[in-house]
Amino acid sequence: MSVELHRLSNGFRIVTEHMPGLKSASLGIWVNAGGRHERIEQNGIAHFLEHMAFKGTTSRSALQIAEAIEDVGGYINAYTSREVTAYYVRVLEDHVPLALDVISDILLNPLFEPREIEIERGVILQEIGQTFDTPDDIIFDWLQEASYPGQPLGRSILGPAERVKAFSREDLTGFVAEHYGPEQMILSAAGAVDHDQIVRMAEKLFGHLPARSAPLAVAGQFSGVEHRVIKDLEQAHFTLALEAPGYRDDQVYVSQIFSMALGGGMSSRLFQEAREKRGLCYSIFAQAGSFADTGMLMIYSGTSAADIAGLAGLCIDEIRRAADDMSTVEVDRARAQLKAGLLMGLESPASRCERLARMTAIWDRVPSLEETVDRIDAVTAARALDFGRSLCTSGSAAMALYGPVGATPGLAELSERLAA
């Protein structure tokens, strides 16, 4: 397998990986324009724009977009995150040119018809409403906001309903004009693909776009607070975040391995102590997430009103204990889990395609799998312990609670317990 990267004269990047023996391909456009690139009055517009991409172009109706891909057995979709918006397709190898034509069409020639805007506005408002009916969804938005209060990185991707209700066609076209330049786009393809063919097609479809820079995203600064919503629910939902490295930081894999040993599986400390030994909860986990310039190690659990205070204290105690005595055996296990997850995930062209785009956006190159595995293997128990101690002493924590959570200690009390 070989990765090839090419940049057009206007800054548009193409990255591909041919995977011998496959008859299918995944490809798409990743745009460096997500929730953190919005001004406060634009909050939610990147996601709104993603929805509108499939609602018709100058040459295809919404139905024709879907039919063009599904008539050949393919699959088309999109997503918005805090740092990117992605539009992607999975097709058989003979239909790669068609797939790229459709993706370029929805990006370059959207109609944004007023009637379709109103229809999709209603869909998004339903989506926002649904999140509030799903406690273990909305609480992560609240934790993000509590970790980065008053910052673009802390805002909801969906945006508040009142802003979504007010977005106009001009707002959509204005965001495209600001952020959808060729230097912000990456065409990624993996599977049964020919790099030179895709470069030729990309030159024809995107080469005419004028080069232009986009506004830089506001830097993220972890400065945690507490967000507590008391409501009569069956479960008390608890989330805690501690400041962790961004994905360009040398410590990023240390953070991932520490969080995996802490709460990444059935053998992890949190699962064994909270669920297996004490029966305090059904679901509990820890994970590390990273952005360009910051990150967060997060713990989530749902429990009863009677157990929420004990569970919160146990989570703090397990972080402290892990920072004091995490063993080489635990680090080895977490390292093996992380590598296996990485390598197993990359057996599909869709996962390869995603990785190519993500690595190109971060590094403007694609590190080899061997390089990545070497960085994971370089994480020792000593480094994990140092990282854990830094978590305990940093003083940076955020917490979001939802449900019958009145008995939960406050963030200040839990932070003092962590640093004790």
Image (cartoon, rainbow, N blue to C red):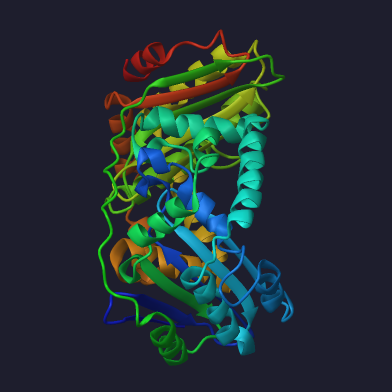
Q: Residue at x 44, y 34 (%)?
A: 144
Classify residue 217 as left or right of residue 227: left
Residue 244, given in percent of the width and then of the height, sits at 34, 39
- Please indicate, yes or no, whether residue 22 appears anywhere in the rendered image: no
In the picture, residue 419 is in which quadrant?
Answer: top left
- Residue 336 in the image: state x and y as whole percent: 49, 55
Q: Position of residue 239 (x, y in %)?
A: 51, 27
Query: Residue shown at 67%/40% (left/top)?
Result: 126
At x 47%, y 48%, the residue is 45
Front position in the image: 110 or 204: 110
Q: In this view, which residue lies farthest toward the top?
A: 407
Q: Give the answer, above or below, for where 294 lies relative to 113.
A: above
Q: Can residue 266 be seen?
A: yes
Compared with 251, 66 (above or below) is: below
Is residue 83 found left or right of 248 in the rendered image? right
Which residue ends up furthest to the front in the rendered image?
A: 114
Instruction: Give me the residue at 37% from left, 13% from top.
Output: 412
Task: State the residue in front, 314 or 410.
Answer: 410
In the image: residue 146, left or right of residue 27: left
Numbered disc total = 0
Which quadrant is home to the C terminus? top left
Residue 185 to residue 134: above or below: below
Residue toward you, 111 or 27: 111
Q: Is residue 50 left or right of residue 132?
A: left
* Nearer to the camera, 370 or 82: 82
Percent of width and height locating residue 284: 59, 32
Q: Quadrant of residue 273?
A: top right
